[in-house]
Image (tube, grey):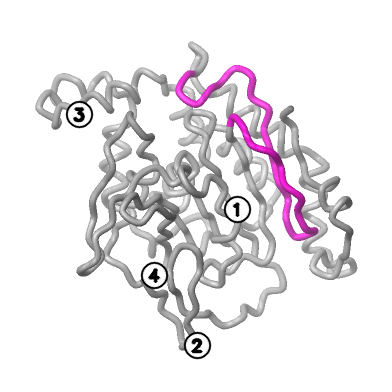
């Protein structure tokens, strides 16, 4: 799998072989990584809302599992954050379970079950019309991570990549929670992939965001997983960990996922926003800052215990 470029130099990453892209003229190229996390991924919408509300430019989005869904509908389908919040408010876990049942039954009863799937059927039809190369809201690149069962490692797809896997296929595969949804078999030329939930092998694809194929110099991580530690980070990385006590991977409050959205907004608070704003301050560029590993760890933002 190759990415198109004028540079011509190729190299291999954990996801694919890509061509090295030329350095960008901008000193700061912000990538947002949206983790897996099931229904907890609704908090990504709150994080994005805070970034947009405070005029933080988002150059690239990389998503996996639930993050692939949020990233794709925002950047590729072009839904507004208000629309995504509306979906979160209307969504119920039973909608996902009914959609899973419909797929397992081969869609034979789709006309009966669709009305019990909430917004899912209409949103999937919109996803079919979207692509990696027609993006919205100022986002320049979109990356989606899946897990390939045939080789046991991640597969990365994104804007400008020379592949035949569609955005629709990549997002649906990345969000295919094991046991709830079956893997999706696709062909990229003569090569077959059996794709499933990207969180199986790369739940927080920070490396893909920094890869030249995406080109982020500075990364904001929205980590909505139920478990997992916040690692040591450098000064060009802000790690946001929303605290969600009322939302699980496959369960949510009776009033929907609006609470998770609010949790995401709360996690992207003043301290987080100040650190991000400092990246754009020419008098103290974050890329020139140096810190010890312990200082790096202290700068990670973790709001969950």
Circle nearer the viewer, 1 or 3: 3
Q: Distance between the residues labelled 4 and 3?
A: 31 Å
Disc 4 marks which residue?
A: 161
Vertical relation: 23 (above or below) 297: below
Please provide the residue range marked out in magenta: 226-251
* Residue 61 location (% of width, % of height): 53, 55
Q: Which residue is drawn at 67% across and 41% down?
A: 50
Disc 3: which residue: 104
Q: Earlier in the sequence, mark 1 or mark 3?
A: 1
Which residue in the structure is indicated by mark 1? 32
Q: Is mark 3 on a helix, strand or loop?
A: helix
Q: Nearer the viewer, mark 3 or mark 2?
A: 3
Question: Which sits earlier in the primary sequence, circle 2 or circle 1?
Answer: 2
Q: In this view, does 281 lie above or below 65?
A: below
Residue that badge 2 annotates: 7
Q: Earlier in the sequence, mark 3 or mark 2?
A: 2
Q: Residue at x 47, y 79 (%)?
A: 19
As drawn, is 255 to the left or to the right of 164? right
């Amino acid at each position: 799998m190759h990415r198109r470029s004028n540079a011509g130099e190729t190299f291999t990453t954990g996801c694919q072989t890509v061509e090295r892209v030329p350095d960008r003229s901008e000193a700061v190229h912000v990538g947002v990584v949206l983790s897996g996390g099931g229904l907890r991924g609704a908090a990504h919408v709150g994080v994005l809302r805070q970034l947009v509300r405070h005029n933080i430019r988002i150059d690239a989005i990389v998503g996996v599992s639930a993050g692939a869904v949020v990233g794709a509908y925002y950047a590729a389908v072009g839904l507004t954050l208000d629309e995504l919040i509306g979906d979160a408010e209307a969504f119920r876990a039973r909608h996902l379970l009914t959609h899973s049942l419909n797929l397992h039954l081969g869609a034979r009863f789709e006309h009966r079950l669709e009305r019990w799937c909430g917004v899912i059927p209409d949103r999937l039809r919109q996803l079919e019309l979207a692509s990696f190369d027609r993006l919205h809201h100022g986002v320049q690149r979109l990356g989606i991570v899946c897990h390939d069962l045939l080789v046991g490692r991640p597969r990365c797809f994104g804007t400008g990549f020379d592949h035949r896997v569609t955005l629709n296929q990549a997002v649906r595969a990345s969000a295919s929670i094991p046991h709830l949804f079956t893997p999706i078999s696709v062909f990229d030329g003569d090569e077959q992939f059996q794709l499933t939930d990207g969180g199986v092998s790369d739940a927080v694809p920070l490396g893909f965001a920094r890869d030249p194929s995406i080109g982020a110099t500075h990364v904001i991580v929205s980590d909505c997983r139920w478990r997992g530690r916040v690692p040591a980070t450098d000064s060009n990385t802000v790690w946001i960990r929303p605290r969600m006590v009322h939302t699980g991977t496959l369960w949510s409050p009776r009033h929907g996922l609006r609470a998770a959205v609010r949790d995401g907004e709360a996690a992207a608070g003043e301290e987080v926003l100040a650190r991000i704003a400092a990246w754009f301050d020419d008098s103290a560029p974050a890329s020139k800052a140096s810190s010890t590993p312990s200082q790096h760890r202290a700068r990670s933002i973790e709001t969950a215990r």
